[in-house]
Amino acid sequence: MSQDQDHFRDSIGTIKEDGKRAWVFPKKPSGKLYTYRKYVSYVLLTFLIASPFIKINGNQFLMFNVLERRFNIFGFPFYPQDFHLFVISMIIGVVFIALFTVAFGRIFCGWMCPQTIFMEMVFRRIEYWIDGDRGAQMRLDRQEWNAEKIRKRALKWFIFFIISFIIANVFLAYLIGSDRLIQYITDGPAQHISTMVSLLIFTAVFYFVFAWFREQVCIIACPYGRMQGVLLDNKSIVVAYDHKRGEAENGRKKWRKNEDRAALGHGDCIDCFQCVNVCPTGIDIRNGTQLECVNCTACIDECDTIMEKVNLPKGLIRYASENEITKKEKFKFTPRLKGYTAVLVILTGVLIGMMFLRNDLEANILRLPGQLYEHKEGNIISNVYTYKLLNKTTKAVENVHFELISPKGEIKLVRHENFDVEPEALAEGTLFIEINASALSGDKNNLKIGVYSNDKLIETTTARFLAPRSYK
Ligand code: SF4
Ligand code: SF4
């Protein structure tokens, strides 16, 4: 593409020359892919809204309680102690998205991103229902504030507010847990003013995003969108205009009945601008792959409808790579893809292994800082420790005590009796470990300690034991 043709890259299509916002009035999409996207959106919306309210073994299916640092992923509770698992999950997520993007471009944005789903499948459809299609929306926008415009705007903004409020509630259920949210609702907002204020702030943010900011999220705010430039190459499959076919030797040209376009050297694009009119980010896909394109497929459907009408083959705009269009190359599993896949498989294996090895009770026994050892009667050396037991399950761990597995010795709890660790709670305390000096092998000894519940070994942990040097 020459520099002349590249001028569209100098500015964003949704900003006018005077710097003001060029509001996008996309035509209502229709077609095979739009219907599939609607079905996918129903499934994803149900998943998104229901997830915080589904419980598995008493654990919320998905929860991201950042404030209390408690996370549930697919019903598995994660604590700050599981941070390594969380980090691996995040890395897997990033590699997975990178792999997908290298191979299939922004397919995630068009089909799965919550922003696109809520914008195109919820808010936009309400807008079509109230304001009508593109032409009617443009007319209404230009129209003076008469009764019709006031009624339509008030109705639309009210519904947008209600939906934003519902989304904010679901968002809060992810953050603080659905049980607590329901509790707060039953108590009434007056008793939880700060939560109510947060809820209204979230509502305002969602309202701002879906009623006004809209496609700007994908164009200028989304970090994933920014990464496209480095992830995409000529082999990536994206929503693409077949410029070879569309332009041919003599370029695109308006449709004229009974004209032999092939003989005149004109491409199959009839320059009807329907692909531009339907685009929710306001771009012309015929200019080539652009950062603004969220791969929503609306232009594919629209162009296919036009091709059908003028009796030309469908697929002038389709999922294709640049190499497929220019060199007729089919999709290849490139070395880069193989590399990403290998990393993904290894990381997933590590994560699954670590998840299975993870204990329901996590024990940490640490020597009390600043304390050395005590030499007691009968050649006994004593060290003092603090212990922390985290119960990651929703059931109490009962009748807990510690035993020294190696070397031989005795563990004495300061509280002198066995104890219970409540569900999803942390039990802390102090204990002494006493070992006969003859059983020690030096001034620094490694201990293996067993944690027992109802006399059953449920976890082992290690600790350091200090003794005088003379016992080396
Ligand atoms: S919809 Fe198809 S035919 Fe019409 S302008 Fe776009 S690419 Fe050309
Ligand atoms: S160019 Fe096509 S696929 Fe990309 S955002 Fe616009 S309508 Fe959607």
Image (spheres, helix red, strand yellow):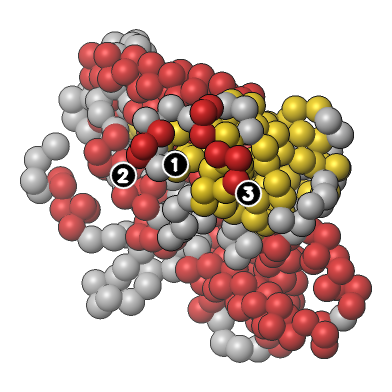
What residue sits 29% from the left and 33% below the top? 232
**Which quarter of the rendered picture does the N terminus lie within?**
top left
Tag 1's secondary structure? loop
The residue at the far front in this view is: 378
Measure the alpha-carbon separation of dots 1 and 3.
14 Å
Q: Is mark 3 within 8 Å of ligand 2?
A: no
Image depth: mark 2 or mark 1 in front? 1
Pointer 3 local density, CA inside 10 Å: few below 14, some 14–19, many at least 20: some
> Quick check: 399 left or right of 449?
right
Residue 418 at what x, y percent from top left? 82, 46
According to the picture, the residue beneath numbered tag 3 turns out to be 432
Measure the alpha-carbon separation of dots 2 and 3.
55 Å
What residue sits 79% from the left and 42% below the top? 400
> Quick check: 447 left or right of 315?
right
Residue 218 at what x, y percent from top left? 42, 55
Q: Earlier in the sequence, mark 2 or mark 1?
A: 2
Residue 467 disc label? 1
Pointer 1 local density, CA inside 10 Å: few below 14, some 14–19, many at least 20: many
According to the picture, the residue beneath numbered tag 2 turns out to be 227
What residue sits 35% from the left and 60% below the top? 220
